[in-house]
Image (cartoon, helix red, strand yellow):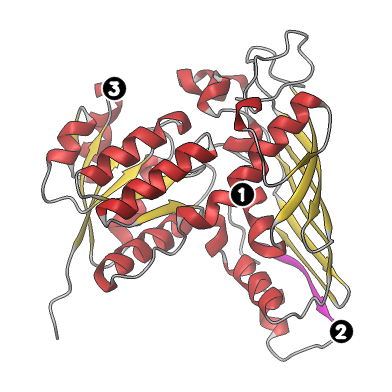
């Protein structure tokens, strides 16, 4: 048997999501966790001990480790651009957490830097790889829904005040801490993935339960897709105790609804033998983040990480590229612009400078994070 190259990873950031990446790497065949880096020693040392890897205190140390093939960028959202570019310039492949960045320009800069350096750039949009989502995607590809009439996402979660105060960036608008781009981005992305490009959004954002932070904890948005379908995104971190997210696809010939990882509805005019097994997907209870920021499994991260390793070995694209996530980011940014202006926003966006204006001082309507 030919020798299989070991793909070695380094994590930049030892915060909330880092253990999920570490577990995913260690559970993936042919992958090795080499190091974790964080400026906070009290955070990085315990994690390095827990996972048996090196502890670094800076990005430079991580990039200087010649054994590392891939940098997993787990920094606050507003730091993604500079980190990804630095990694690319050092010849490292990159797997970045969502959202790709805080602007389309920063995202394009990242894509260009990685392309110029000849390195892979993947993104951890882990919800895409879930079995129920893949079943919906396959049904879309096979046109089983016929014309899609409506595609909706509902995310009614709960996060305590302590969550927002646990790290400085979690209460900062320009760091991307609002519910739209920090939590709901996964489900905005799923709607784009399943129902196609969006042509306009009309959004409202409020802070209803976290007055100690100046950002939105609740989003309601009406979307129009290029296909003529419409959709709703309703997302919040204000609703105790938190319930599983829901994705609903309704077409002229069928309906598919996922609740958490459970296939709740799967019905088509053209019934097939494989439909009954699909209806059973997710029947075992799996936490999906509704009740707490660490209440989910690492299996989806493992799938994305294993896909990244495979892309490097076989010189193919990562499982989910940042290019694929660009329009999802554009939709989220348009939601912020719409909430700020009180008007619908058409896509493609023409002026990103209007996305992050100063926050309202009235404690009602918020437009950023």
Element marked by disc 3: loop
Q: Position of residue 349 (x, y in %)?
A: 67, 41
Q: What residue did someone put label 2 on?
A: 269
Q: Tag 1 or tag 3, which sits nearer the N-term?
A: 3
Residue 232 highlighted magenta (yes or no): no
The residue positioned 32% from the left and 60% from the top of the image is: 27
Q: Tag 2 or tag 1, which sits nearer the N-term?
A: 2
Q: Tag 2 or tag 3, which sits nearer the N-term?
A: 3
Q: In what quadrant of the picture does the N terminus appear?
A: bottom left
Q: Nearer the viewer, mark 1 or mark 2?
A: 1
* Residue located farthest toward the front when viewing the structure as drawn: 350
Q: What residue did someone put label 3 on?
A: 40
Residues drawn in magenta = 260-269
Image quadrant where residue 149 sits:
bottom right
Image quadrant where residue 35 sits:
top left
4 lies above or below 76: below
Q: What residue did someone put label 1 on?
A: 328
């Amino acid at each position: 048997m030919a020798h299989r190259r070991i793909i070695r990873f380094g994590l930049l950031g030892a915060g909330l999501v880092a253990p999920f990446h570490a577990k995913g790497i260690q559970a993936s065949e042919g992958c090795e966790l080499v190091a974790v880096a964080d400026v906070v020693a009290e955070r990085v040392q315990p994690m390095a001990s827990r996972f048996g890897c090196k502890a670094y205190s800076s990005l430079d140390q991580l990039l200087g480790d010649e054994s590392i093939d891939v940098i997993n960028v787990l920094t606050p959202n507003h730091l993604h651009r500079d980190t990804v570019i630095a990694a690319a310039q050092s010849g490292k492949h990159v797997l970045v957490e969502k959202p790709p960045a805080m602007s389309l320009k920063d995202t394009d800069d990242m894509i260009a830097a990685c392309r110029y350096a000849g390195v892979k750039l993947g993104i951890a949009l882990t919800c895409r790889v879930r079995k129920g989502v893949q079943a919906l995607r396959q049904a879309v590809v096979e046109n089983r829904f016929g014309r899609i009439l409506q595609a909706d996402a509902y995310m009614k979660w709960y996060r305590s005040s302590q969550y927002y105060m646990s790290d400085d960036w979690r209460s900062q608008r320009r760091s991307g801490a609002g519910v739209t781009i920090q939590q709901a981005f996964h489900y905005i992305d799923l709607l784009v993935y399943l129902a196609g490009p969006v042509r306009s959004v009309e959004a409202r954002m409020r802070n209803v339960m976290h007055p100690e932070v100046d950002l939105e904890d609740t989003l309601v948005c009406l979307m129009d897709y290029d296909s003529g379908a419409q959709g709703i995104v309703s997302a919040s971190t204000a609703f105790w105790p938190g319930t599983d997210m829901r994705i609903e696809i309704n077409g002229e010939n069928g309906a598919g609804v996922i609740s958490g990882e459970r296939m709740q509805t799967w019905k088509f005019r053209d019934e097939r033998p494989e439909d009954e097994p699909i209806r059973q997907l997710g029947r075992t209870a799996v936490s999906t983040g509704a009740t707490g920021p660490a209440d989910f499994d690492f299996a989806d991260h493992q799938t994305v990480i294993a896909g990244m390793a495979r892309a490097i070995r076989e010189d193919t694209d990562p499982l989910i590229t940042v290019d694929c996530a660009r329009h999802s980011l554009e939709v989220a940014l348009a939601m912020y612009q719409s909430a700020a202006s009180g008007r619908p926003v058409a896509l493609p966006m023409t002026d990103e400078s209007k996305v992050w204006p100063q926050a309202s001082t009235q404690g009602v309507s918020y437009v950023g994070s």
